[in-house]
Every structure is written in C-alpha cells, then in structure tokens.
Image (cartoon, coloured by chain):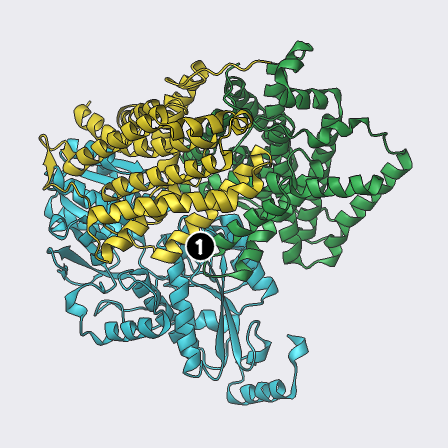
Chain colours: A cyan, B yellow, C green
Amino acid sequence: MPTMTTRRSLLAGAAGVLAAPNIAPAQEAPGVTANEVRIGSTNALSGPVSSYSVISRALSGMFKRLNDEGGVNGRKVNFLVYDDGYAPPKTLEQTRRLVEQDRVAFLFNQLGTPTNSAIHRYVNQRKVPHLFLATGADKWSNPKEYPWTMGWQPSYRTEAQIYAKHFTAEKPNARVALLYQNDDFGKDYVNGLRDVLGPRFDSAVRAVSHEATDPTIDSQIVSLAATGAEVLVCGITPRFAAQAIRRVHDIGWKPMFFMTNVSISGSVVMQPAGAEKGIGVITSDYRKDQGDPAWADDPGMNEWREFMRKYVPDGELGDNNYTYAYGAGTTMIHVLRQCGNDLSRENVMRQASNISALEAPTLLPGIKVGTSPTNFSPIRQMQLQRWDGRSWQRFGSIIEGAQV
Amino acid sequence: MEGLPHQIVAGIATGGIYASVALALVMIYQATHHVNFAQGEMATFSTFIALSLIQAGFPYWIAFVLTVVISFALGVAIERLLMRPVQNAPVLTHVGVFIGLLLIVGNATGWVFGYTTKVFPSPFESEGLLFGGLVSGHELGSTVVTLAVLLLVYLFFRHTPLGLAMRAAAYNPVSSRLVGIRVGWMLALGWGLAAAVGAVAGMMVAPVVFLDPTMMLGILLYAFAGALLGGIDNPMGAVIGGFAVGVLENLAGAYVVGTELKLTVALAIIIGVLVVKPSGLFGRVVLSRV
Amino acid sequence: MSATEDVPATPVLVQEAARPALPAWQLGAILALGAAVALVPMFALESFQLFQLTMAVIMALAVLGLNVVTGYNGQISLGHGAFYAVGAYCTAVLMSHGDWSFWATLPVSAAVCAGLGFLVGFPALRLGGLYLALTTFSLAVAVPQILKHKAIEDWTGGVQGLFLVKPDPPSWLPLNADQWMYLVALIVSAALFFLAWNLIRSRIGRALMAIRDNPTAAEAMGMDIASLKTRAFAVSAMITGVAGSLGAVAIEFVAPDSFTFAVSISLFVGMVVGGVASILGSIFGGLFVLFVPNLAEEISKAAPGVIYGAILIGFLFVLPDGFAGLLRRLAARWRR
C-alpha cells in the first residue's frame, strides 16, 4: 500500500529489518496496517441454509472479544463477512470483493463445498490464504496443488471410513443400509464406505438418497428396513436425523446405527427424536456436546458459555454450530498470535501450516489441532461414542485418520 | 416389491401433509384467484408462533386457537398492507410481490425464532405405531383434523352468505361490487382464512417432520402439484390430489427410478395428467366467451 | 378454451407501433452512444467491478430471454433457470471434456436450449396461467437433480461440478482477462438484444403480442397459435441458455448448487422490476438482481434476505409496471 508510507511505517519497517532480516515489514502486506488486520469471509446470511450464519456471528463475537482485550500485537481484527446465499457464483463475486476491493489480508472459514470450489482456483492463483473452511470435504487437504487452501474439521469421508472399519470389525459380513443426502456432503459417506469395503460395496450396501427438499424420509427408511440390513449408516442433516432415529425405532428395526456427527446434538437431534429412542446410536465426534452433563463444570465449556453470555447473548445455546465456531476461531487466533508482527500472506500460510498440538476449549480431551507443510488437515482425530439415553458415552481410543 | 403396503401407507401419511397445505392453497385461490408462493413460509412462521405460546405455558388447544386467530389477523394485515397497493397492477407484479413476501417471511423466521430443529408437540401422541406398525396416532389424528377443516371450508363456501360473497368477489370483482359486495374486504378475509388454514397445516405437519425454518421448503411444491392435480378450484380435489402425489412419489422412488429422480418423475406424471385434463382431475372446466 | 385466468394483459405499451420510425441518423447516434456507454466501464472500472458488471450483463440477457416468452407472449415461466443451467452445462461439458473453444460451444448450447424450449412449449399449449407456472417451476426444480444423477455423472461431474477456463484475450488486443470477458459478454448480448429487438418489431413479434392480448381474435385472423407459441418458447430458451453459457465461463465453474430454483426466481424478479415486455427493462432487471442484494446486505447483515424482499416490494409499490413503465411515462411527458 504505497500511500501509507508514513514515517511510522518506515520506522516499523526498519525495526523489522533489525529484528529479523527475512521478515517483510508488516505494512507492505495487503490488509495489514499498524493497528488493523483485515480478514474476510463469506457465509449464507440469507436463503435456505442460513442456519449456518450463526457461525459468522460467533466468529465476529470472538474477534470483538479479542479486540476488547487489545487485539493481536496491537492490531485490531476487522472481520468482514459477506452474504453469498450459498450460491457459488455469488461466492466468487463476494470473494473478489474481499480480495480486490476491501484488500483483506486473507480469507477465513468460508461456508460450503460448492461455494468454496468456485473460488478454489482463484484464491490459489492470487496466493491468498484460504483458511479453515466450514466444510467437511476432503479435497481441501491438497498442499501440493492448492498450497493456499486449508480445511479444518475432519472430513466426512474419513468419518465414514471410521464407521466402516468399526462395523466390519464387529460384523464382518453384515449387510449395510446407507441413507444419504444427495449432495456433496452425503456422497462423501458413500465414498467413505466404498473406500473400506472395496469390491464388496456393491453387494453388501443398499444406498438410498434423499433430497434436502423432501419433507420426510419415511419412504427411504421403509425401503432400507425391508432389506433387513444389520447396519445402518446415515449421512443426513439434523431435521432428517431426528426423523430417522424416531422412525427406525418405531418400526422396530434394530440395526447397528451410525449417525453423522453433523446431526448428533443432544438438544437438537436426540431429545426431539426421543432420548430413549436413540439408545445405541453410534457416532464419532471431535467436539464436546454442550448438552452433556459431563461438561457442566468443564473449564473449556465454561469459557465458551461465558463467551456466549457476553458476546452472543441471544444465541441458542443448544446449537452446536457455536461450539464448532469457537474451535475454528480459537485456531485462527492461535495462528494470528503465532504470526507475530509479520502478517504477510506468506507468513500467515506458513504459520497456519505449522500448528503443533493445539487444544481448543470446545474440542474433546485428547483431540489436537495440528498441521505441517505436508498435512493440511488440522483435525484428523475423532472418538467413537454411543448414545445411552442421556448423553454420549465415548468408547475406544482416539482414532487418528482411518488408515484405509 | 419389498414392503409395498408400507410404501403406500408411508405415502398416504406424507400425502396428508401435502393435502393440508394444498387445501390452504385452494382456499386462497377460491378467495383471491391467486396462488401465494409464500404460503408455506407463512405456515412455518405461524407454527413457530404456536411453539412460542406453548413454551410460554399455554395448553395445547388454547395455543392452537390463538395461533389460528393470530395467523388470520396476519393474513388480513398482509393483504391490506402489501397486496392492496398493487391491486390494479398486472398479475406478474403480484407474483413479484409474492416473491418479496417469500423472501421476507422465509428469512425472518430463522432470524426471529432461531435455526435449530425443534420438537413440536402433538395432541394425538401415541406410544409407537398403531395397526401393526403402519401409522402413528398423530398421523391418524392429523388426517382427521385435515378432513374436519375440509368439511368446515366446504360448508363455509357453500352454505354461508359470506362464503358466497367471497367466491363472487374473486370470480367477478366488477359485478360483485355492483351488487354491493365489499370486494376489498372479501380479498382480505380470503388471505386471513388461507393463513389460518396454513397455520393448522403447519401445526399438523411439524410433529411429523420436526420444526425448523425450512420445514415447508419442499412441501409447498408438492402441495401445489397436488392442488393442481385435483383442480385448483376444488377443495376436495386438492385433498385427493395431495394424497395421490404422496403415494405416487413414494412408489416412483422405491420401485421405478430410484430416490434421486422421484420428484422429477412425480412431476412429469402430474404434468402428463394436466396436459390431458388441463383443469385437473376434479376441476371445473371454465369456458370463456369472446 | 379452458384457461382459468390467463397471464396478464399488459397492453399498455404495445400500441406505440404507430410511432414514426426514427430517422437513420438519430438511430445511429443512439446506437453509438449506447456502445460508448457500454464500453467506458471496460477502462474506467477496476477488475472486480468489471466482473460484477459482466455478471449483470449476463443476467440482463437471461432476463431478456424470459421476457420474450412471458413478457411479449404472455406464457408465464417460473423455470427459466433451467435453460440457464442447461446452457451453462453444455458449454462446461464441451469445454472441459472435449477441449472445445468457448465460441464453438455457443451454437451447440443455443441449439440444445432452443430444442428443450420447443419441447416445453408443447405442454404449455394446453396449460395456462398457474398450470404453466407449475410446469415451468418443476422444470427448474428437476434440472439440478437430473444434472447430478449418477447416469450422467461422468459428464457433468455430479455434485462436485465441473471446472473450465475463461477464454484468453487475443494477443493483439491489450486487454486483461476480465476486460476481455466483459467484451465477450457484451458482444454476445448485444447480438442477441439486436435479434430480439428485430423479432419483436417484426410481423412475428406483433403476432406474439396479439396472441398474448387476445388469443381468440388472433386465431380468427389466421395466426398459427401453436407454432408461434412453441417457437417463442424456443427463442426464449435459446437466449437464456446462451446467457448460461456466458455465466459458466465468467465463473469458470458449474455445479448443481449454482442453479437452484433461486436462479429462476431471480430472473423473474429481474423481469418484473425491469418492466414486463420491455427490452431496455431487461437491462435494468439484470442490474437490479445483481446489485440490490448487495445493497440489502449493506443495510443489515443480520437478515439481508428480509431487506431484499422489502426493497423488492417497495419498488413494486412505487413502480408497479417496473423501470420501463417509468421510462414510458417520462417519454410520454416529453413528447407532449
């Protein structure tokens, strides 16, 4: 930013050169001034999937808290979020606005798989860090071809692999029923099971899809139950998950039942479905469930509750998008601190790919956020857990990746 | 043909949902000769009002009645505030206003009431399923409610002077005005009634599908299809059409083309039927004189 | 005939056919001025704003397509997003699987969309008003589901979609990729606007409007209604489909989620706010649907959708016959 070459920036630049010769003066980095760093994001603030907009609200709250506490290295964070309505063309438009007009330093936690796909090449050509995306696709972890893009949560595909490994160990020749939403999210459960079952997939699995616009999934459950499968895997969103758990119980089908960790909140899915109807449902998660009495006095969750009380006072405490956001936001702030005074895009990316064993307040004990220049999957660990009618009981050890 | 009876029964249960919303669509058509695209979102909004009342401590049926009354008032208010200023504009402008309404109500619901999935109580709760695991008590109860609403609507439009005046106002506003019917208020009443019927539909649907702001997103299209299949000017036809769409869709998905195309095929069949019978299966054929 | 009530007669503007044609020099001056106004942004705006304007031009073209069938011919369509999607996928599939150049895909995309539009026109002959609205709306809902179906997944990329690359500017032109894309969109759109303008002013155009305003009289005068209506659908779908092709290369990515029924709704909104049955109005409509959501967002981050809906309704209160209606009133006052 040539217009900003004031005396102070010259001095700061000189100090930078003295302290660490290879670090570029911060003022030359886009989106960074002496007292501000600008970060951009997009989310569905309008339209049918605007339920995810709470993630951006929580992140804005976290940056506000950070600024109230003095910011990072004397810089306040200016977090800009634009609405893309979950439409990929709009995501490209808004991202270009952030990068070219608002000149943000980097992009953080943009929502969605198709939306991020639309900007994947653009941000990598422009060399803008595209960090900790709010999507569980596994294509974000590709440092060779896309060195500027990084996801955050464990991929859905890995999750499905974990389920497949678990049920093949327990019931080696089981017939499997799979219910998935017909989009990129649901299809990853098909891919994950196929990864593990290999050639056996076609004969062992009966896969049935539903559309997000279907009112109910009763017909699909009827079809699947009629196969008499001993295992059921569901890659579906919360409203349908509650329907599925209730329906499977009511028709007296008792499969080994795996539910995606997208849809396992105690208060949003399990209680509505009927707490006792979900007994035995298995999932694998990396977050603490805020409804679980086990975390009532947990210091991490108390920190989160305190944050919610102060910065998102009207937020629904049962919504686990908030615990997700808290984890992602903690990671981002950690990276900002780790960057020191150098917020150039190169250094932000270098630090983001150099996180060692970070524990976040809303993540399960033992789950660590970690990256390296060859590992762009910040969270690779999960733990299996089973619903006992009141809360999720973890069992087995922490599983790292699925190692298919 | 695994589980054919189960598929049919599941289809009838889902069809009941479509039928109740289709009924609301027919309702507003009878009274205004419009189809309101925001009908589904308005019903969702009403259902959230009901939930708030129940959470505030009102007994179910009191909350039910209050919600119907509030929804009626909201419907009247929308007609007075939003439709009235454009009453002389072309129909395509009306559709534009409906779209605006859809955007407003659809986006406001989550903003006001939150986005998480919520459980909505049913007054007909039963443990498990009745009749050998085929239907739940709620599905049975809500079907009865739908039929009761249908009967009330039929009686109202056929046998009350107000109902007659409303039909007349929609059918021929100019002549109606000449015989002293207050056409503007009849339209407003139509909106109110449609909103009320929509609220009932929402409260009957929510216990089955669970309540969140997108609850009615897909339902409206199916209901619309059901209403047109049965004939948009015939409440009975709309109910039958709704059930037919539910069953048709399940059978197509389970046995013919797979779940990925079940909506597409169901719609194709409906359009096929409409091409043969352009006023729907039970609709009146309107002849216009030149 | 069995219609319930047919889509609106908006006959207000058509009677102006009697207006004497402009002298050639005036017409030339207007065209030159228009071209200048369209070309200035290419050098005056930054890349990002030029990209936005490119998208607005593309939306305007898509709205024009809808206007041909709904505005001028009175057949309501709530599903033009389907043609936009098919056009986009034609270009994307040919470019990413067949290594075709962008220009070569345009005729294919136009032909495919015209064919599809022609087919949709047949049930439309029997269905009026609401029934046609449902038919077209279900097309808009069904197309994304068909696009991701596993039978054609190898071609369409399924739920993951397809990537493609913008056409490069020719080396003898000193333009960057965004400027070239804008110019491409402008040239293609200008050609199709010209085509539509000629069509509307021709005998066929008058026949289309006559059918809209009084089908029985039109038939009595010997017009072949079925053929005209289906062909109107074909032309309309072709124009919107070509807009889809442009949209695909401008974004360099297609996926089923890019073509939900929200696209059809946007096009419809563009037509209504621009002014039904107005060529100039289509341009305004394209600008409206691209820029007003951003404006709504400036007003409230909490619920931009609510604000957008409110702006839309407020606009229709003030200008029930759209932007073109305002222009017409101003023009009428001018002439008096």
Q: Nearer the viewer, residue A345 or A73?
A: A73
Q: Residue furthest front?
A: B180
Q: Would residue A158 be found to the left or right of residue C313 on screen?
A: left
C311 in relation to A82, above or below: above
Q: How packed is label 1: few (under 14 Cα within 10 Å), some, or many (20 or more)?
A: many
Residue A246 lies in what quarter of the image? top left
Task: Specify the amino acid type for callout 1.
Answer: Ala
Placement of the C terminus of chain C among the 4 image quadrants: top right
Q: Nearer the viewer, residue C4 or B268?
A: C4
**Residue A172 visible at all:** yes
Q: Nearer the viewer, residue C77 or C104?
A: C77
Q: Nearer the viewer, residue A354 or A114?
A: A114
- What is the x, y in percent for residue C320? 62, 41
The residue sitting at 64% across, 19% down in the picture is C214
The residue sitting at 15% across, 63% down in the picture is A397
Q: Would residue A159 be found to the left or right of residue B261 on screen?
A: left
Query: On the image, numbered disc 1 is attached to which residue?
Result: A44
- What is the x, y in percent for residue A91? 51, 53
Q: Secondary structure at mark 1?
A: loop
**Residue C162 visible at all:** no
